[in-house]
Amino acid sequence: MIRFACALAAFLLFVPNLPALGQQLTVPDTVYEAVRAEAGTWDAEVTFFSGGKPSGTAKGVQVNTLLANGHWIVNEFKIPRTEQFPAYEGHGMWGYDPVAKSYVDTWIDTNDGAVRTAYGYWHEAEKTMAWSAKQPDGQGRFVDYRFNVEYKDKDTRLYTFWQLGLVRPTQFIRLQILFKRRPA
């Protein structure tokens, strides 16, 4: 325990911008508008891609629940099994991290063997959230992903997911999801 306390004290000496334990950072409320925009139940039309061309479709449902303070959202996304694809289930949480000064998303799902953490930036003029992630592939390499969420209107958003090539950073599309909010 003494080692931990000494290590923590040393760490805090070199990180002067961290808030004291229990202290809240002041963040403009507008930062959380993109987070709050995703609350609710969404029907999803999924298009998968292979070689840059559509290779299949599926339908799913995403249920997004805001935490009480409206700063973080929990995502639960499910796609039932089809003749072409196995059932899919993903769980995540994202929001604005005032220490990192970035949106942060953590995601796990039935397709991946590791947690994916992404960092995002809100582009107000385009109503688009741009994300970047690096995820271990289980073979000693990291795979780079990019994804955007375009907020078409309050009840429609388009999620596009790209992977960067391992040898060359060529971006290729993996999937697109058109989300439509269910009426309350």
Image (spheres, rainbow, N blue to C red):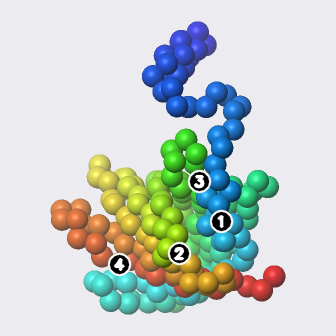
Q: Crowding at label 3, few (<14), some or many (≥20) Cα neighbours within 10 Å?
A: many
Mark before the other along the chain sequence, 4 or 1: 1
Mark before the other along the chain sequence, 2 or 1: 1
Q: Secondary structure at mark 4?
A: strand
For disc 1, the marked residue is 33
Q: Are marks 3 and 4 in contact (CB under 8 Å)?
A: no
Residue at the spot x=49%, y=89% of the render? 57
Q: Crowding at label 1, few (<14), some or many (≥20) Cα neighbours within 10 Å?
A: few
**Residue 46 seen in this snapshot:** yes
Residue 110 location (% of width, % of height):
53, 65
The mark lying in front, picked from 1 and 3, is 1
Q: Amino acid at mark 3?
A: Tyr
Q: Amino acid at mark 1?
A: Glu
Mark before the other along the chain sequence, 2 or 3: 3
The mark lying in front, picked from 3 and 4, is 3
Residue at the spot x=37%, y=64% of the render? 145
Residues under labels 4 and 1: Cα distance? 27 Å
Residue at the spot x=64%, y=49% of the render? 27
For disc 3, the marked residue is 96
Q: Are marks 4 and 2 in contact (CB under 8 Å)?
A: no
Quadrant in which the C terminus is drawn: bottom right
Q: Crowding at label 4, few (<14), some or many (≥20) Cα neighbours within 10 Å?
A: many
Along the line of sight, the residue nearer the viewer: 65 or 47 = 65
Residue 78 location (% of width, % of height):
62, 74
